Amino acid sequence: MRSLFVIAILGLLTSCGNSENSVQSNKDGIILKVTHDKPVDTVVLKTDPRYKLYDQPDTIITYTGENSILLDTINIPKGYYELSSNNKVNKIYLQANSRLEINNLDTATTFKGDLADINRYIAVREGKNRELRPYFSPFSYGKLTEKEFLRLNDSIYSVFSELVKNLKNLPEAFRSNELNIAKIEKANQLLTYTFVRPRNEKDYEPSENYPAPLSEIDLNNEELLNIDRFRVLLWSYANVKASKTDMETWEYILSEDFPSKNPKVKQEVFYTAGIFDLPRMRDPDGYYEKSQQFLEAGTKRNELTEKYYELKKIGKGFPAPEFQLTNLEGEPVALKDFKGSVVYLDFWSNSCKPCIEDMPEFKKLQKDFENKDVKFISIAITSNRERVESILEKNKMTGIQLFQPGKDKELMKDYAVTSIPRYVLVDRDGNIWNHIAPRPTDPELKEQLNKLLGS
């Protein structure tokens, strides 16, 4: 059945033929024409963060005015973009010396011009992404047995790889990149399954026949840096390996055991480790010093320098970054309101399963300290209010619950929050005690709270 389905998709894509590609291209840039069947106020063209190419800069162009037609000649680098208008988002691909016409209707989107075949393919690829997204979720496939998961992962890979392999009108460089995206996604799922399966099967260990996640990928191929998930895959793999030794992840990346020997690839994964791990490293000073030697001068080294000095501001004994947010009743709550008490900050999200799994222990912790001067403040970030309220009600959570979209990014930056769940301990004087505090499930947390309380 799967093969028949893929053939049906291919027929849909190729049935339009090449007659529509006769529109003349523009040698000085990209002619982009977008037509809507209803008037639009704003059209936004920006870089697609998920698929952007390695050297593709972040770009955003906003067009305003009441019109149903946009026609412009733009000079931007080739790559993947998002075109948003009338609450509709088109994933598109653009490159110089070409023309693309997009006709946005309520019922469908059609393409004409030099890039029509590529963008028809992307439209179908994104449709399949939406359809299969529930199966991509670790919370979903973590419930499957190993055999069931491997069958599912192979099937999903086959759908995407066959889709791009069998189209005849795609440029080879584009086709190669899309095939690599599918291959890296498959590898990511293979690696992630080994993390999430033990949550549903406590004693799970991969079988002898479990595929090595990196076995089908040329880890020295610099072209794979065009795929952001490639760096994340190698960083995740390094995390696993480092956790089995006394190394930090970045130390493993620099070691001879790291599977890619390409210096450029190693630099990118080393940089990725800094972006994700710097706030929780045992030796952030050591990492920073090495970054100044190992990374080439430029944007990435500057970015890590900025993060390092931001992190310094939330070291032990420094004033906790002040904030004022609203609770679920819309009332303002400021950190300074609790000066004189010990504060335990909880950063969580409605999409973070480990955050939600911590809630029963969090409630027990609140019960244990209910007669002591500790304030428990939970802050929902990057969340949906309806989902937040539902989760809190289901878990019968009490304490101080804050939620204010729009201030998320600023707060996450102030507290160097790069992953969740994340907990922070603040002493009675309003100073940071531990910016990576133990989770409610960790017995060490009670020891630290009692120490701060002087008991």
Image (cartoon, rainbow, N blue to C red):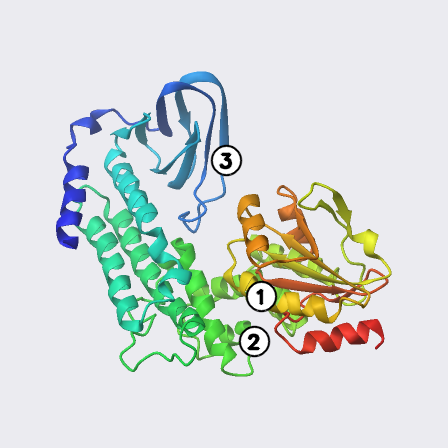
Confirm whether residue 298 shows in the render. no
Percent across and percent down for residue 448 are: 75, 75
Q: Quadrant of residue 73?
A: top left
Image quarter hosting the C terminus? bottom right
Indicate whether 156 appears above or below 10: below
Marks 2 and 1: in contact by CB < 8 Å?
A: yes
Answer with left or right where residue 404 lies relative to residue 248.
right
Answer with left or right where residue 318 lies relative to residue 259.
right
Cα–Cα span, label 2 and label 3: 37 Å
Percent across and percent down for residue 278 are: 61, 65
Indicate whether 282 appears above or below 312: below
Q: Residues within 10 Å of mark 2 (few under 14, many from 20)?
A: some
Q: Quadrant of residue 116?
A: top left
Indicate whether 220 appears above or below 10: below
The disc placed on residue 262 is none
Confirm whether residue 430 shows in the render. yes
Mark 2 and mark 3 lie on one chain; the one further toward the N terminus is 3
The answer to which of 42 and 19 lies nearer the viewer is 42
Marks 1 and 3: in contact by CB < 8 Å?
A: no
Q: Which residue is mark 3?
A: 60
Q: Residues within 10 Å of mark 3 (few under 14, many from 20)?
A: few
Q: Residue at x 38, y 66 (%)?
A: 142
